[in-house]
Image (spheres, rainbow, N blue to C red):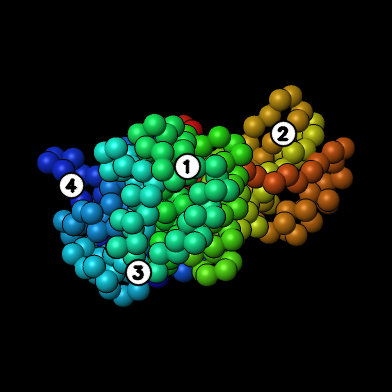
Amino acid sequence: MIEFKNISKSFGGLKAVDNISATIEEGHVFGLIGTNGAGKSTLLRLLSGVLEPDSGSITVDGEAVYDNPAAKGKLFYISDEQYFYKNGTPGDMLRLYQAYYPGFDAGKWGALMENFGLEVKRKINTFSKGMKKQLSVICGVCAGTRYLICDETFDGLDPVMRQAVKSLFAREIEERGLTPVIASHNLRELEDICEYVGLLHRGGILFEKDLDEMKLNIHKVQCVVKEEAVLELIRRNLDVVTIDNRGALYTLTVRGSRKKVEGFMEQLNLVFYELLPLSLEEIFISETEVKGYDIKALIL
């Protein structure tokens, strides 16, 4: 388990991370979401022990991370700006990580390199951005660590490779309980893989929630309403978060159990109504609007 307790970090007069507390459980995919400059990369560097917090504590399985090789050995950090040896090859990176991670699986590494079509003896500086990301992911998965820390991992990957990486993560989670922590500014990339999500804004975390739990308790309702009295009845009896309309066709975001929402809508005997699934982006729009934030300034 990873725990952040009142973490803050400043660079000069800029507070990059501001009093963040959060918990990341093992065996689940945690998505850290926020715009560029929200503090995601700084938080991941703090988690990986690259930076020391100004205040607060970060522990991995109860051990402090900074300046602690034992705790760092449980993490593999894939940064947004990856570092490789100058003129190095994937084989050179293999030998480096074997030295740092005793549980590194060289056999799995070779098989994945072949499956992904990456040449072991080719100079990495001739790789494309996407190929470098693939190499980093393969090294991270094969390191055998309990936690994989990923900063914008899907950026630069084509759609086929994005799906391949997600499938690889899913297999590792199932087989050995890997815990990926994935930071991104793009909600759509994380929607089909994350179980828990945290929204970071201006250095602070607005909230962290179970994605399935959020989906079960918030719904999109489309309905045809021709009378203002009926619309007012919906407002009074349901927890309506947002409401839009085009003529008589209304789209509402409503909190509450599906059973309660459907039961009430059935009583109205409307010409038409249906409950639709919400995307992760729509869920966050509703959640942040409740907290008084302009979602358009937070996420894509």
Mark nearer the N terminus (3 vs 4): 4
Labels 1 and 3: the sequence-earlier one = 3
- What residue is disc 1 on? 119
The quarter in which the N terminus is drawn is: bottom left
Mark 2 Cα within 10 Å, few/some/many (few <14, many 20+)?
some
Give residue 266's position: percent from left, percent from top: 83, 51
Secondary element at tag 3: loop
Mark earlier in primary sequence (4, 1): 4
Q: Nearer the viewer, residue 154 or 251?
A: 154
**What is the spatial separation of the Cα atoms under label 3 and label 2, in whole angstroms?**
59 Å
Callout 2 amino acid: Tyr
- Along the polypeptide, which appears first: circle 2 or circle 1? 1
For residue 221, say whether it is visible.
yes
**Secondary structure at numbered mark 1:** loop
Most extreme residue toward the bottom is 62
Q: Which quarter of the figure has residue 280?
A: top right
Report the residue at 54% width, 64% height from top. Answer: 173
Q: Mark 2 points at which residue?
A: 250
- Residue with the mark numbered 3: 102
Tag 2 secondary structure: strand
Nearer to us in this view, 151 or 234: 151
> Mark 1 Cα within 10 Å, few/some/many (few <14, many 20+)?
some
Calculate the distance from the C-alpha at mark 4 to the C-alpha at mark 2: 46 Å
Label whose residue precedes the other's in the sequence (4 or 2): 4
Amino acid type at circle 4 is Ser
Say few, some or many: other residues with alpha carbon within 10 Å of mark 4 (under 14 / 14 to 19 / 20 or more): some
How many angstroms separate mark 2 from mark 1 (CA)? 55 Å
Q: Which mark is residue 10?
A: 4
Dot 1 amino acid type: Glu
Q: Identify the residue at the far top of this view.
A: 247
> Going by the image, does 284 lie left or right of 212?
left
